[in-house]
Image (cartoon, grey):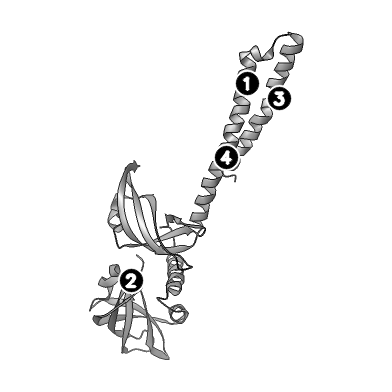
Amino acid sequence: MKNPSERMQTIGWIFFGLGFLIPFPLIYIYAFYFEKDPFDSALVIGLMVLFFGGSMVLLVGSTFVSLLFGRSKKVKNGPLVFGAVVSAGQTGLFINEQPQLEISLQFSTLDGQEIVASTREVVALTDLSEVQPGVVLPLRYDPAKPQKIVLDFDVDQESLQAALDMQMIASGDTTQEKVDIRNNGVKAQGVVLSSHPTGNIINGKGEIELHINVERPNFGGTFEVTVQKAVPQNSLSTVLPGSVIDVYYHPWDEQNIVIAFRFE
């Protein structure tokens, strides 16, 4: 299927060809049969302006559309990462009675660049509360121009987790070993018995010491473990004492657990 720029180019070249096929025979007829100046004819001039002028508009316009279309495609197919909302405000435009928001987000690219960029998105009225400062949202960016971003809400859970793994490994928030534990280890649930801030800040997130009681799903019984975890501010409520959390571990190394935050 042709994109808009390719369709414009095709129509432009057709107009250019018609500019030779239609006006020039008329010029010949006016000049040699009627012995009149063909350029005194409004019909000849009008057809030349229509076909040659129209072809130039379409061919030049296709270049700009190509740049816009290509950039949009690069962004939509770009790397998937997570960004924290810095600000969000209505632009005043409504589409199907849904407001358009200009959303500014801060995120890290996969090569470690810290970027603050904005995008305009139409957001359902029922979802406005989910686009507030501090909320983490999935987005894609153009690797060549990271300032060009678009939110991506159509990603499945597995892709979200894979993207989070890549971004956290790149930023130093996790390791490949912990990713392997989550992918290949035993999934269990644990209850947070206590949580205390350590006073450390890791990549802008407060470190919390968590004492967790984990229930073994296969072998029965429970075990307790204490871990230090850098927790985003908007996820602090999920690690309060009494909270039930998902964890992963290997049966032969129960003290090395991975806490999984959900994206819902």
Q: Residue 194 occupies which quadrant of the picture?
A: bottom left
- Of mark 1 and mark 2, the one earlier in the sequence is 1
At mark 3, the secondary structure is helix
- Of mark 3 and mark 2, the one earlier in the sequence is 3
Q: Nearer the viewer, mark 3 or mark 2?
A: 2
- Marking on residue 21: 3
Q: CA distance from mark 4 to mark 3?
A: 23 Å
- Residue drawn at x 71%, y 25% is 21
Is 61 displayed left or right of 157 in the figure? right
At mark 1, the secondary structure is helix
- Of mark 4 and mark 3, the one earlier in the sequence is 3
- Of mark 1 and mark 4, the one earlier in the sequence is 1
Q: Is residue 131 above or below residue 179?
A: above
Marks 4 & 2, CB-CB < 8 Å contact: no
Is 158 displayed left or right of 33 in the figure? left
Residue 124 in percent (x, y) is at 32, 50
Residue at the spot of label 1: 47
Residue at the spot of label 4: 62
| Residue type at numbered disc 3 | Leu
Mark 4: few, some, or many residues within 10 Å (few <14, many ≥20)? many
Residue at the spot of label 2: 204
